[in-house]
Structures are given as structure tokens and as C-alpha cells.
Amino acid sequence: MMPAAREKSPEGVLRRCWGRKASGFVVVAGVALGWEMACRLGWINSNFLPPITQVIESLLGLLLSLELINHGLITLQRILAGYLLGAAVGYLLGFLCGYLPRVYETLELTLEYLRPMPSVALIPIGILFLGIGDALNMVIVAWACSWPVFVNTMEGVKNTDHVLINTGLTFGYKRWGVIREIVMPASLPFVFSGLRVSLGIAVAVAVITEMVASGTGLGSFILQASLSYLIAELYAGIVFIGLLGYSLNRLFLLVERKALGWQQGLLLIAK
């Protein structure tokens, strides 16, 4: 088998994927080892940064006691609710502004005034209207998530190839047919880019909001651990948030790969 063909074979693809994953594990193991050694040798004050083994021990204890699991499920519920609401609003508004430029021209001043506004700055206003609870977290997360989806969707719709649209019209598609069969599929890569950015934002904003205005969730757990000077538990909560964000991102990439499988097929045909 020729080298080029061997690289494109399933075995070659699998070998490259495992090679990249192995490199990532080596980096993580190296950072963990350096962290442990720096703490054990006294290079870092363990009162502020405990050894990684102590953090893992604390993490396992919190998982077995279900304390961290319960807080994580509450945070996950808030993340998903706010993320889905924000993504829906951002997509609809972005599609409308991208497909109908006059709509964006009318709303441009309002949208560009609101878009840079930090979501955290809206928490006091949210407390006034919604009180402290799940509704507040969901709305703040939705606000933060809607803007990346809005911008990417609008750009994706605006950048749809006009040759494709004219071809659709030539084949007798009406406006809704052009939107459904051409504009929506062509803009999907842009939409998924915005959705992926928003997912990371959703995790961060949900945790911050829980720190400020909630008695439950991972953000509240981390804040209480800090105030109680439970340093190992503090870092265990942070590690758990990282694992949660990583898991959500991997799940999103799986969905994206399934949804945009046709795009990979087109790239292979073009090659």
C-alpha cells in the first residue's frame, strides 16, 4: 500500500487520532506531576495550592458523598436551560437580520448597544425582576449565549452563495424552499461555531451567577469552600467544573460531526 493511501486508511486515521490524544495525556500528566512536585518540595505554599493528590482525594470524597454531584446537576440544568433559550433567540434574530438586511439596519443601533453589555452587570437588575433562583440564572445565561449565536448566524446567512440561491430559484423553489433547502444548510457551519462558543460562555456565566446570587450549584459551592478556607475542596470544585465543561464540549463536537457530516462528504468529493 502506498504511503498516501496508508495515511487515508481507517487504521491510519485511528493511529493519528490516538497519537494526538496520547500527546494531550502526556501534557496533562506532566502538569500534574510538576504541580505535585512543586508542592511537595515547598516551592509553592500548599496553604494556597495543595498537592494534586490531595485535590483528587477531596474530589473523589465529594463525588462519593454525592455533594458535588447534586451541585453539578443543578448547575447543568441551569446551563442547558439558559443555553437552549439563548441559542433559540440568537438563531432566530440572527437569521432574520441576515436574510433581511433592512431588519438589521433598523435594529442595528439597539443590538450593537446591547451586545457588548456584560451579562454579569445585569445580575442586579435580574434580581429586582426575577429574585434569586433558577429563573435568574437561566435568563443571565441565555443573554450571554444569544450574542455569539446571533452574530455567527447572521454572518452565515449573509454569506450564503448567491449562485446557490439563484440556482434554487431556477429550479422553481419559492422563498421558503430557498430558505429551507439552501440558506439554512449553507449557514449551519457558522451557526455551530456560534453554538460552540456559547456553550463555553454558558458554563462560565452560570458559575459566576451562582457565586453572586444563589445558594446552590457549583459556583455557590466554590464560593462557600473559599470562605470556609477549605482549599482542597475549592480546587476539587474547580477541577469538576473543568471536567463538566470538557464533557459538554466533547458531546457538542459529536453532535456537530453528525449534523455536518454532509459537509465532510462534499470536501472529499472536491478532493
Image (cartoon, rainbow, N blue to C red):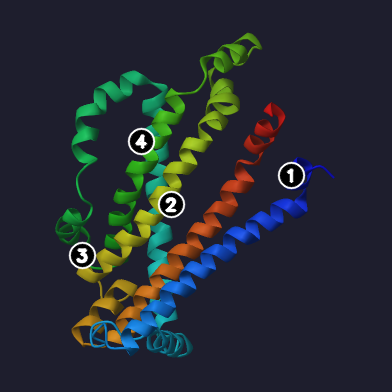
Q: Nearer the viewer, mark 4 or mark 2?
A: 4
Q: Is any atom of residue 217 visible in this view? A: no
Q: Residues within 10 Å of mark 1 (few under 14, many from 20)?
A: few
Q: CA distance from mark 4 to mark 2?
A: 16 Å
Disc 4 marks which residue?
151
Ranked by sequence position, the earlier of labels 1 and 2 is 1
Q: CA distance from mark 2 to mark 3?
A: 21 Å
Q: Which three-letter amino acid code belongs to the residue tagged 2?
A: Leu
Task: Find numbered disc 1 in the image and state the secondary structure of the residue it sits on.
Answer: helix
Q: Which three-letter amino acid code belongs to the residue tagged 4?
A: Val
Q: CA distance from mark 3 to mark 1?
A: 56 Å
Relative to the observer, which residue lies in front, 218 or 247?
247
Residue 103 image position (x, y, % from top left): 32, 23
Disc 1 marks which residue?
8
Residue 255 image position (x, y, % from top left): 58, 51
Task: Find numbered disc 4 in the image and state the secondary structure of the residue it sits on.
Answer: helix
Q: CA distance from mark 1 to mark 4?
A: 36 Å
Disc 3 marks which residue?
131
Q: CA distance from mark 3 to mark 4?
A: 30 Å
Q: Nearer the viewer, mark 1 or mark 4?
A: 1
Quarter of the view holding residue 170:
top right
Ranked by sequence position, the earlier of labels 4 and 2 is 2
Disc 2 marks which residue?
84
